[in-house]
């Protein structure tokens, strides 16, 4: 099978269920942003210790499922995959609370950086926020049902990634860099 089909050369592509769509469609933007988020998660996984990497890989699987749902309207194509649920949000919140319990209270805004893994986590967090915005745009523009929990999950995921940055500062012994507003 050839990787190139030349069908996209004129700005159109096909969804997983075969439906044709313009590459400028909000839906494709959401699919692309979720895919980019997943790639940044993969890079972050390469830069953290195995226990955290394992948790991040579970999140990657959830993102693949979300991407599949956005890419298809066909229940047949989705098979028995379940869209993100409340239990996935609770798992993120429990992980946030677990990390937070090990950290001192945040007293200032933190500049991204300090270590390659921390900077990678910050980039992943900002890509997550963009994926959230594009998912919301598609859901609102097309009045998609059943994505409220997925949107909440992506929102909580950006919180989780921020806490991951703070946790990495702590576990690596690298001080957080306070933002000096000049005031």
Image (cartoon, rainbow, N blue to C red):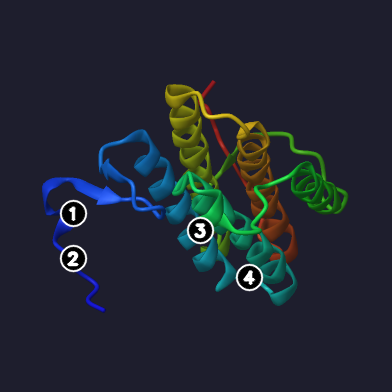
Q: At which x and y percent is residue 75?
A: 56, 49
Query: Within 10 angstroms of label 4, few (less than 14), some, or many (20 or more) residues?
Result: some
Q: Is residue 77 visible?
A: yes
The tag on residue 5 is 2
Mark 3 or mark 1: name the one nearer the start of the chain: 1
Do tag 4 and tag 2 residues touch (Cβ < 8 Å)?
no
Distance (Cα) linking label 4 and label 1? 37 Å
Do tag 1 and tag 2 residues touch (Cβ < 8 Å)?
yes
User: Can you tell which of label 4 and label 2 is closer to the viewer?
Assistant: 2
Distance (Cα) linking label 3 and label 1? 23 Å
Q: Is residue 121 visible?
A: no
Mark 3 or mark 4: name the one nearer the start of the chain: 3
Instruction: Identify the residue position indicated by label 4 in the image.
Output: 48
Mark 2 or mark 3: name the one nearer the start of the chain: 2
The secondary element bearing badge 1 is classed as: helix
User: Can you tell which of label 4 and label 1 is closer to the viewer?
Assistant: 1
Query: Within 10 angstroms of label 3, few (less than 14), some, or many (20 or more) residues?
Result: many
Instruction: Identify the residue position indicated by label 1 in the image.
Output: 8
Q: At which x and y percent is residue 104?
A: 82, 45
The secondary element bearing badge 3 is classed as: helix
Distance (Cα) linking label 4 and label 2? 37 Å
In the displayed structure, would residue 87 be above or below residue 146?
A: below
Instruction: Identify the residue position indicated by label 3 in the image.
Output: 38
Q: At which x and y percent is residue 148?
A: 64, 31
Do tag 3 and tag 1 residues touch (Cβ < 8 Å)?
no
Within the image, what quadrant is residue 117 found in? bottom right
Of the pair 10 and 127, the residue shown nearer to us: 10
The secondary element bearing badge 2 is classed as: loop
Of the pair 93 and 80, the residue shown nearer to us: 80
Do tag 4 and tag 1 residues touch (Cβ < 8 Å)?
no
């Amino acid at each position: 099978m050839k990787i190139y089909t030349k069908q996209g050369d004129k700005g159109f592509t096909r969804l997983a269920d075969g439906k044709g769509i313009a590459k400028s469609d909000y839906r494709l933007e959401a699919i692309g942003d979720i895919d980019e988020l997943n790639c940044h998660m993969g890079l972050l996984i390469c830069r953290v210790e195995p226990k955290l990497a394992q948790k991040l890989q579970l999140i990657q699987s959830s993102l693949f499922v979300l991407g599949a749902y956005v890419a298809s309207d066909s229940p047949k194509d989705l098979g028995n995959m379940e869209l993100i649920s409340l239990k996935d949000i609770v798992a993120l919140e429990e992980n946030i609370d677990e990390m937070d319990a090990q950290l001192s209270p945040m007293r200032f805004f933190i500049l991204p950086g300090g270590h390659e893994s921390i900077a990678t986590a910050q980039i992943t967090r900002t890509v997550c926020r963009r994926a959230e915005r594009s998912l919301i745009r598609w859901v609102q523009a097309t009045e998609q049902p059943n994505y409220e929990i997925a949107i909440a999950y992506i929102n909580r995921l950006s919180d989780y990634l921020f806490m991951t940055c703070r946790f990495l500062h702590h576990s690596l012994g690298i001080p957080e860099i306070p933002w000096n507003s000049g005031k």
